[in-house]
Amino acid sequence: MSSVLLISLTVIFSGIVAKLILNKYNAIFVFFTSGIVIMLIANALTGTPILGKATLGSPLLDVFGFLTKSFKSNLSGIGMIIMSVTGYAAYMKHIQASTKLAYLASNPLSKIKNKYLVLSGLYIVGMALKLVITSQAGLSVLLLATVFPVMMAIGITPITAASVLSLICIDYGPNDGSTIFMSGVLKMNVVDVFLKHQIYVAGSIILVLAIVIPLYYKYMDARDLTRGEYQSKELTVLENPAVPGYYALLPIIPLAIVFIDYFIPSTKVDVITANIMGMFITFVIEFCRRSDKNEIPKDMLVILRAMADIFVSVVSIIISASCFAQGIKMLGGISIFAHYIAGMDGAVFIIMLVLALLTFLFGIIMGSGAAPLFAFGPLTPEIAAKLGVPTVTLILPMEIASALGRATSPVCGAIIAEAGFAGIEPIQLVKRSAPLLVLAFVINCVASYIFNI
């Protein structure tokens, strides 16, 4: 089979999928349908078996066998992990523990005299909170409620305040769903992935943006003032949640357990167990503190509803994207392309840049940081093997790039919420943040290459 044809088909099918998603077709439906079609076409053209030796007897049956296999493996693995993390996060929000954490973490920012340095402080604090509150949308809502009023009080314009919040988007840390998915592809402990690889790249981005943020937004505000576009907003009152101060520690429990366990060889606690332990500890604290004890068991419904919602919005995308990824993998176009240029100077960086850009663009189209990584991430081990580099060299920049793409998307839920709070259109917010997000993308690729080659 012609290599040029297979590469062309890979590009065409990826383009069709992107076009359908841009036209507002459901991403889960598109991934499932395209995956089935591509797998059948790839099997007919290349003879590559869909299920290998575990075939059910025909390619058509094997497609549905692959769907069953994907459901089973993802629901019992990465899907259950993400659902447990999300359930715990929803519980923390319900009892106002995460709001207390955001309030206490952001309160010192009001003490900084230079308002543009406050923006850098906010970004650093926000990225620290992102380790604990892993959902960009969830963290954005908390920061809009707690930090946005602080910025209004010191004279930050709404568009600048919202833009800084939109930069708090990088998915990283042992409790993050994308990181957990990446660790599965790498077959590495999630804490190892974070401490040995991810922290250096994410840290580089955070450091550079923290330096650039005051300069960029001071310039943009001055330009808006010159053009007569400078905004103001009525001040709002910053409210302290009516829960004890130690509640701010509750959202950190699972992360702390995972880290502590990592350094104790005699124990082995996974992310799901850590979150269940956190739930149990919190239930005990709630039972001791609250007077309405009969209402406490009902909090289980909050956790279960959140787990169900994340199954619909994220886990189902993981399963459907795995079908699309299998089809693209069977076509082999990306692998063939990587093989062709493997001998060129800078081939690794070129392939890394292409894959990162692919997930970045799909992140913009879909308004999701997870879906592009779930679709293209599984292709990286084979490509990395052809290039003779560690898989992390390719998949880590893809993971961060997909999150940056999400923050550059006007259809992203967090962007819509931040723009609405600031009284502007999502596209205005994206335009204001885009230069820094593109800078972050460049740093991501360069740092990933330097630290993980």
Image: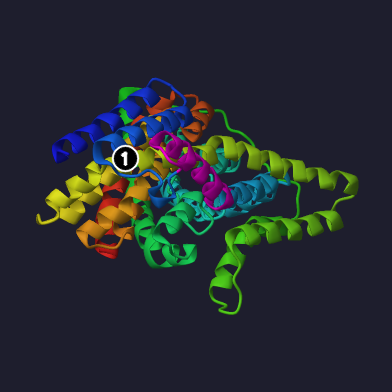
Q: Is residue 224 left or right of residue 171?
A: left
Provide the secondary structure element on which disc 1 rests: helix
Q: Position of residue 380 (x, y in %)?
A: 31, 52
Q: Residue at x 38, y 54 (%)?
A: 206
Residue range highlighted in magenta: 56-79
Q: Nearer the viewer, residue 105 or 186?
A: 186
Query: Which residue lies at the image location 33% right of the left edge and 48% below the top edge?
Result: 379
Q: Is residue 436 visible?
A: no
Say if 320 sits above or below 255 in the image: above
Asked whether residue 170 is in view, the answer is: yes
Read off the residue under disc 1. Answer: 328
Q: Residue furthest left?
A: 344
The quadrant of the rendering that contains the N terminus is: top left
Q: Is residue 361 above or below residue 387?
A: above
Viewer-proximal residue, 437 or 304? 304
Residue appearing at x 60%, y 79% in the figure? 266
Image quarter of residue 376: top left
Most common SS among magenta residues: helix
Q: Let me know if residue 62 is in the magenta part.
A: yes
> Given the image, on which type of amino acid does mark 1 rest?
Ile
Quarter of the figure that contains the C terminus: bottom left
Residue 300 inside the magenta-drawn segment: no
Q: Can you give x and y, in whole percent of width and height, for residue 281 in the image?
A: 75, 61
Q: Relative to 250, is 210 on the left or the right?
A: left
Classify residue 76 as left or right of residue 451: right
57 or 316: nearer the viewer: 57
Query: What colour scheme governs how the chains and residues are painted in the rendered image of this protein?
Result: rainbow
Farthest residue, direction top:
23
Bin the neighbour count of mark 1 within 10 Å (Cα to Cα): few under 14, some 14-19, many 20 and up. many
The location of residue 222, given as percent across then percent down, is 33, 34
The image shows residue 8 at horizontal and vertical percentages of 19, 33
